[in-house]
Image: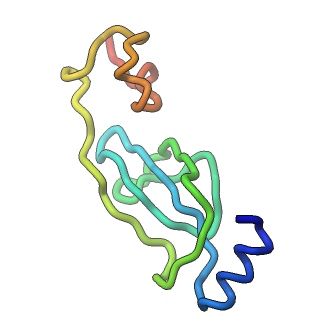
Amino acid sequence: MERSALALELQSNRLTHCYYLRLYCAQHGEFRAAAEHAGQCYPCLICDVPCDCTVLCEGGTSRHLPFWDLIHGPVALSSLSSNPSDPDLTWFPGYISTLRV
């Protein structure tokens, strides 16, 4: 949907413009959030530590912003392969930077 079409839909349905985001905190896990602004880094919604952020889409909501839901808790590194080229790790952003030797 073009930006102008989105604006018309938001207005006609009385929705607030927002960005839907995926946040990952090494301590608290993965979140889905909606916020007024898109960015590359957001603070964890629990501990306030900067997290990787991926913009999933742009849209609208009738809920008050920001809002979020915990998708799942943190992934234990011991349960993951130690091989950084393992294709199963491509879903885990920042995996290499979180490894502790």
Q: Residue 75: percent from the left, percent from the top?
A: 26, 34
Q: Nearer the viewer, residue 86 or 100?
A: 86
Q: Is residue 72 above or below residue 75?
A: below
Res 100 quadrant in image:
top left
Q: Residue 28: percent from the left, percent from the top?
A: 29, 47
Res 57 quadrant in image:
bottom right
Quadrant in the picture for the C terminus: top left
The residue lying at 27 percent from left, 14 percent from top is: 81
Q: Nearer the viewer, residue 63 or 76?
A: 63
Q: Is residue 11 above or below residue 83?
A: below
The residue lying at 45 percent from left, 49 percent from top is: 23
Res 69 quadrant in image:
bottom left
Q: Nearer the viewer, residue 22 or 28?
A: 22
The residue lying at 41 percent from left, 57 percent from top is: 32
The residue lying at 46 percent from left, 32 percent from top is: 93
Q: Is residue 69 above or below residue 65?
A: above
